[in-house]
Image (spheres, grey):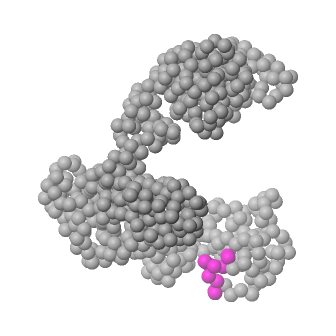
């Protein structure tokens, strides 16, 4: 969202978002006939106040706000809001900004509460995982049911079943045991089975998307919260037995040193082989149960604060752990953002949006026209060639309505571009394809309708949309009127520089030149010979570097420099008597100065180009604002402004 947050920004007149004047939300001002409501003004005033380093009075803000609104009014008058690029960008932002508001909040809360209730306890589970491509895979379903039945009947041992049937190689040889589960890290169906099955019981088979699982709950306990720790690691993973034995000897020696009182952090920085924590004295972030590899995890949570563990072996190597802090599990309120993020990244994340959409479909009476779809199916069935290319071409031209949203019909020709092109004699199959696409389009139109109406019912969203709308308009017109105009107007820059030459000075002399880099002595001489015939008065500094590279190829590079003594080792060497930089390892082994001279003060605009551009932009901005004040009327309701002032303390 690159262009938008100018700290002022609202009034989406281009998007048709204009609030009517009312006693509750009166119009505080109009700019070129466009109203700005009090709530809208206060929203941006408060936002701007929170971003200011130095306090700004309300009167000062009003002046700045009016200038901002005048620029937006100019963008609208010049039809910036009608361009396809503006419409596309605003449409993208509208959908993105609307998403958090287009949710069934009750459904979202229930799912977040469910996730928190899972977090409050840990479950130790084992599972048997069976290969299955889809939930309706009959062989997988039959095998899962059979295995579960045999285990419950006592005719099959759980551990034997895991070893024989489970495709999870990481757990199959240890009875399928997965250790302690942490909520939010597994597929929703699997997690639900783990948390809804009683200790000692075995779940019904569940499909997770990866396969079928039979879940056994071995134990449960309250979530112990989080631990802060530091560790020292000696790696054994992917090492020979001899190297692993050496690592064990080293970790034992380190433990003895720590027991004599050595500083843990100093030892970790010298000895640990964990690149992520070594430089920080072995320090780890706070972590919850189940977030670390199992033996490390259990050791950390059983250690009292300040105590150092004996060496602990994991799949990575040998660890010595010192616990530096314990803290209880966060409250539901403290975990609100975390739970929402977990929900949004899970399979259940689309449930609140889906329920909201279903509510909107009822509100706008969005539905398929089944009678017309029946007629369409009959037409296809009666066609000699069925749903072939000729039929498809005909349907793409059809105005027959197939769906309705808020009383507006959706024609078949609008749906057909979304339908998968699959020729078929089966009219029922063709109808299903068209019906699926019609449903998608109907739901998209429903969402779009809801987005537009949301601005009328939700002030927070309305303010955001207004802000983003004006932000896009302001950015685009400012580019044309000020920023790019100043950067590209060479004549204007030169004229401004000449008129303000006395404002641009150097505190000490500069060396001004083109530094020409080459990759060999022969190429350097060739370039020098060519430049000897160039009239320096005709050189355009904006094109000269590129033109020289075009002539001599990629082995020549040109930089325009202007630097005082001590700023650049190359210019120090070429102009100020410095020693030659050591550049033997560089590609550009040769370089020389072309058209170089030492100047006491700026000679031309390019000597202080960035400063002149900035000042010229400011001049263009002031000139533009003066024009806008003369061009567009501004009316401020002083009574409403007084209400705002009385509610604020300047």
> Which residue is more in the foreground, 38 or 504?
38
Q: Who's the residue at 56% across and 74% down the image?
A: 607
Q: Is residue 409 above or below residue 624?
A: above
Residue pictured at 64% horizontal, 36% vertical: 132
Whole-percent x and y of residue 121?
49, 21
* Residue 588: % across, % down: 77, 65
Q: Is residue 511 magenta?
A: no
In the image, is 495 to the left or to the right of 59?
A: right
* x 47%, y 72%: residue: 397
Front one among 567 and 44? 44
Q: Which range of residues does the magenta coloring cover?
A: 537-546
Q: Is residue 44 above or below residue 522?
A: above
Quadrant assignment, res 182: top right
- Asked if residue 10 lies left or right of residue 189, the reply is left
Residue closest to the eye, 269 or 298: 298
Q: Position of residue 173 (x, y in %)?
A: 72, 21
Res 57 visible: no
């Amino acid at each position: 969202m690159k262009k938008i947050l100018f700290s002022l920004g609202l009034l989406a007149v281009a998007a048709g978002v204009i609030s009517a004047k009312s006693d509750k939300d009166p119009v505080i001002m109009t700019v070129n006939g466009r109203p700005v409501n009090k709530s809208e003004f206060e929203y941006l005033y408060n936002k701007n106040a929170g971003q200011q380093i130095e306090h700004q009075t309300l009167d000062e803000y009003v002046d700045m706000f009016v200038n901002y609104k005048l620029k937006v009014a100019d963008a609208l008058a010049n039809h910036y809001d009608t361009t396809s690029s503006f419409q596309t960008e605003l449409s993208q932002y509208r959908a993105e900004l609307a998403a958090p508001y287009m949710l069934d909040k009750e459904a979202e809360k229930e799912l977040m509460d469910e996730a928190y209730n899972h977090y409050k306890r840990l479950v130790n589970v084992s599972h048997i995982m069976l290969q299955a491509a889809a939930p309706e895979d009959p062989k997988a379903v039959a095998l899962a049911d059979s295995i579960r039945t045999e285990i419950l009947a006592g005719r099959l041992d759980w551990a034997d079943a895991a070893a024989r049937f489970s495709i999870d190689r990481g757990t199959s040889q240890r009875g399928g045991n997965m250790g302690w589960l942490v909520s939010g890290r597994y597929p929703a169906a699997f997690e639900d089975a783990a948390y809804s099955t009683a200790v000692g019981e075995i779940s019904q088979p569940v499909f997770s998307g990866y396969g079928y699982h039979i879940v056994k709950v071995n134990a449960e306990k309250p979530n112990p919260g989080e631990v802060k720790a530091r560790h020292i690691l000696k790696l054994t993973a992917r090492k020979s037995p001899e190297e692993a034995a050496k690592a064990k000897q080293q970790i034992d020696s380190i433990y003895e040193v720590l027991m004599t009182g050595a500083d843990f952090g100093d030892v970790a920085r010298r000895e640990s082989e964990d690149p992520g924590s070594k430089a920080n004295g072995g320090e780890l972030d706070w972590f919850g149960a189940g977030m670390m590899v199992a033996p490390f995890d259990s050791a950390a949570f059983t250690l009292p604060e300040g105590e150092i563990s004996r060496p602990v072996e994991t799949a990575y190597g040998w660890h010595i752990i010192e616990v530096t802090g314990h803290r209880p599990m966060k409250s539901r309120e403290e975990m609100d953002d975390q739970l929402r993020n977990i929900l949004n990244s899970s399979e259940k994340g689309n449930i609140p949006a889906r329920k909201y959409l279903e509510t909107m479909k009822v509100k706008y009476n969005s539905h398929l026209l089944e009678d017309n779809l029946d007629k369409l199916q009959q037409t296809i069935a009666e066609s000699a060639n069925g749903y072939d290319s000729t039929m498809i071409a005909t349907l793409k031209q059809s105005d027959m309505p197939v769906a309705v949203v808020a009383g507006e019909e959706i024609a078949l020709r609008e749906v057909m571009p979304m339908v998968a092109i699959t020729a078929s004699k089966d009219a029922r199959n063709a109808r299903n394809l068209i019906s699926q696409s019609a449903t998608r389009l109907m739901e998209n139109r429903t969402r779009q309708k809801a987005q537009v109406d949301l601005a009328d019912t939700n002030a927070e969203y309305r303010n955001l949309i207004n802000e983003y709308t004006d932000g896009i308009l302001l950015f685009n017109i400012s580019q044309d009127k000020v920023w790019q105009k100043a950067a590209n107007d060479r004549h204007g820059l030169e004229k401004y520089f000449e008129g303000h030459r006395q404002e641009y000075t150097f505190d000490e002399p500069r060396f001004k030149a083109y530094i020409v880099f080459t990759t060999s002595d022969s190429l350097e001489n060739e370039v020098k010979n060519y430049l000897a015939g160039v009239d320096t008065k005709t050189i355009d500094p904006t094109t000269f570097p590129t033109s020289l590279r075009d002539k001599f190829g990629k082995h020549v590079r040109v930089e325009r420099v202007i630097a005082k003594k001590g700023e650049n080792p190359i210019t120090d060497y070429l102009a100020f008597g410095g020693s030659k930089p050591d550049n033997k390892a560089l590609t550009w082994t040769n370089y020389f100065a072309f058209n170089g001279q030492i100047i006491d003060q700026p000679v031309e605009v390019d000597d202080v180009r960035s400063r002149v551009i900035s000042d010229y932009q400011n001049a263009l901005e002031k000139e533009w604002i003066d024009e806008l004040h003369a061009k567009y009327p501004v009316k401020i309701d002083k009574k409403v402004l007084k209400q705002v002032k009385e509610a604020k303390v300047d």
